[in-house]
Amino acid sequence: MLIPITKMHGNGNDFVLLDNRDGSLELTAERVRALADRRFGVGCDQLLVAQSPRNETAPVAMGIFNTDGSSAEQCGNGLRCFAVYARDRGMAHGSEFPVETPCGLVTVQLMDGGRVRACMGVPRLEPARIPLQAPARAATYELIVNGEMLRVGAVSMGNPHAVLLVEDVDAAPVTRLGPAVQAMSAFPEGVNVGFMQVLNRNGVRLRVFERGVGETLACGSGACAAVVTGRIQGLLDEWVDVSLPGGDLRIGWAGEGREVSMEGPTALVFTGEAYV
């Protein structure tokens, strides 16, 4: 089947977007993998799909699929791109509207220059809601990975995140520890693993190894999780500039019980058609 597609990125985190609001396209894991393949398909970090919303408050719903064909609950960079895509194609109107995501309604605000601000929801900090197998909530948790003791912060932004503090993010063992932490039984649904270097109280550097994808140039929900864990540990102020390999995001969190705010860029790569 030949279908219209759009390719976008947010700080190098790239996405293929398509419209399946009528439900005519059966998106099997095999089809998702074929589209996401960078050699035999279009290539992307995630596939974002416009769907008919269940909540009448939202004009459109967003489905999220990883490159391995699995579904995801949240994607901050993808959400910003999806907001522009939905507005430009008449699925949503105005500069501010809600999007139905797998983890609930998220309000997006479209700004000048392709920038988008999104309310990413209230972080989930209780271990059972991350989910993380731990006896009680703590600022950090000790994990033994291949005989090495790691101390990590953990939070759910609609998807689970573990965040490790490192002295130098460039030298961080992302490809070694990322998949090792993801495979731990302590995270029964897997986990996105962030490696954060604190520069000062308003700035960090971050690399993220994502579930079902691997390391990406940027991760919006990972940036939110990093700031939340840094705030809980008393290392960061309310507004933080997060520098990722693909670019920068601005993250704000006022504290317990409050929503996380994320602001960052989007860019159109191309529009076209693809066989699915």
Image (tube, rainbow, N blue to C red):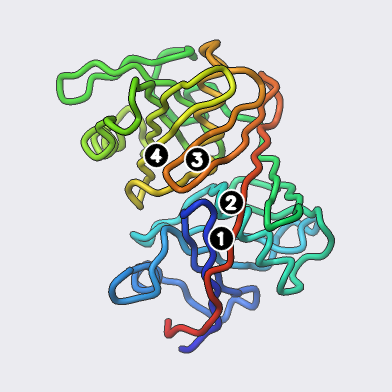
The residue pinned by badge 1 equals 63
CB contact under 8 Å: marks 2 and 4:
no
Residue 243 versus residue 61 in the image, above or below: above
In the picture, measured across the screen, residue 150 lies left or right of residue 264, that is left
The residue pinned by badge 3 equals 159
- In the rendering, at what x and y percent does residue 48 appear? 53, 63
Q: At label 3, which amino acid type do we have?
A: Asn
First along the sequence among labels 2 and 1: 1
- Residues at marks 2 and 4, CA–CA distance in whole angstroms: 21 Å
Q: At label 4, which amino acid type do we have?
A: Val
- Tag 2's secondary structure? loop
- Residues at marks 1 and 3, CA–CA distance in whole angstroms: 14 Å
The residue pinned by badge 2 equals 102
First along the sequence among labels 3 and 4: 3
Q: Which mark is residue 270?
A: none
Q: Which mark is residue 208?
A: 4
- Residues at marks 2 and 3, CA–CA distance in whole angstroms: 10 Å
Q: At label 2, which amino acid type do we have?
A: Pro
Between circles 4 and 1, the one closer to the viewer is 4
First along the sequence among labels 2 and 3: 2
- Residues at marks 2 and 1, CA–CA distance in whole angstroms: 7 Å
Splitting the image into 4 quarters, where does residue 258 fall?
Answer: top right
